[in-house]
Image: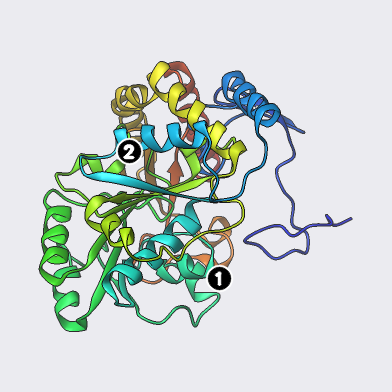
Amino acid sequence: MSDPFFHTWQAQRGAKGLELRGGEGAWLETASGRVLDFGALVYQVNPGHGHRRIAEAIAAQAMRLAVAPPNAVYPEKRELAERLLAKAPKGFTKVLFTLGGSDANENALKIARLVTGRYKAIARYRGYHGATFGAVSLSGDWRRQAVEPGLPGIVHVLDLDPTVTGTQIPRVMELEGNVGAVFLESVVGANGVLIPPKGYYEEVRAACDRHGALLVIDEVLAGFGRTGKLFGFEHWDFTPDMITCGKALTGGYGTLGAVLVHERVAERFEEHVLACGLTHHAHPIGVAAALETLRVYDDEKLVENAAALEPRMRAGLLALRGRFPEIVGDVRGLGLLFAMELRLGDAHRGPKEIRAPEGFPESALVLSPPLCLTAEELDEGVARIGRALAKVA
């Protein structure tokens, strides 16, 4: 019997979802048993499963103020915006709350058009910015191809492809002209954990300044400690114009996203209308979840834990590459976001519609456990991956 709802990103005949029952810390309780979650579900459960403080904060908010229109002002909304701006680089003065990461990028794109008057935007082929129409148009992978034609004016570059050294963005901006924005994941996440080289973002920032384009950094996946720093872009020395957030902003416990906006962009809307907003923007339940999640990150030092466990994760995965050189290729990562390139036969690669195009790595195992992970749990997860590779080998 099929389920009475759609399963996402797959054909429906025979589709099955993960039957969840609960969870605690880095562990999930499923219908078939206890599972060590090395994906933080979909990269969002950074504080871990079953966190009572976050759940209790949500319950208290529901009893105090459960519903509000998007233009409402209430203490938690103000406090959350102030906390986010305090964690952003100097010069960020405004927050636009959204529903999640996809529409954070949608709204950043709208803001860029409103500020610059230009509709062109540059993004990477290897980037992913969300599944709503504008966000998936910015994305470069198969999810964009499935619903084309997308938004006009989106130009993709091969940056971070093995065939490209440095960045194509400055030259493409010259050739295109009138580019209003550049959208980049700080660290490409789901498409293979691709880490830009030293100097990369500084060069892109300079090109944006020369051409009058806004630089938008997508922290939906890499943000809130995933790479061992609060924001992934903090591994480089530059300041973006906008920062988009989602996923781990609430630890997955609420529906909320945000666009953090630098004063040089925000000042435009002192005298001009900000044509953005949806019914559930800054919903009190999501705001309460995010506010307590930020406190948990600080109190439990989860960002620091991700940074501390990075060498152990790297060593464990490199050891697997040494054991299975015919299967495991490159190992790369930051914090608790890692990828292992895998050389697998067709039987293990999944549907042909979603495979990487010719010239890209055949497939990659992306790992992103909750940031509350212990060293012992990390070792257990790596050991389980090793047992799976042994079966494939």
In the rendered image, the quadrant that contains the N terminus is bottom right
Q: In this orientation, does residue 355 appear?
A: yes
Place of residue 251 in the rendered image (x, y in percent of width and height, measured from the top left): 52, 34
| Amino acid residing under circle 1 | Glu
Q: Give SS at disc 2.
A: helix
Circle 1 sits in a helix, a strand or a loop, which is it?
helix
* 329 sits to left or right of 78: left
Which mark identifies residue 85? 2
Which residue carries the number 1 mark? 353
Instruction: Return the x and y of residue 358 as percentages of the image width and height.
Output: 38, 72
* Looking at the image, residue 388 lies above or below residue 169: above
Q: Position of residue 270 (x, y in %)?
A: 31, 58
Residue 102 higher or lower than 335, as above or below: below
Q: Please name the residue shown 78% across and 64% down the image.
A: 13
Q: Residue at x 34, y 70 (%)?
A: 114
Farthest residue to the right: give it: 1
Frontmost residue, 383 versus 36: 36
Q: Is residue 47 visible?
A: no
Q: Looking at this view, is 193 or 201 the one in front?
A: 201
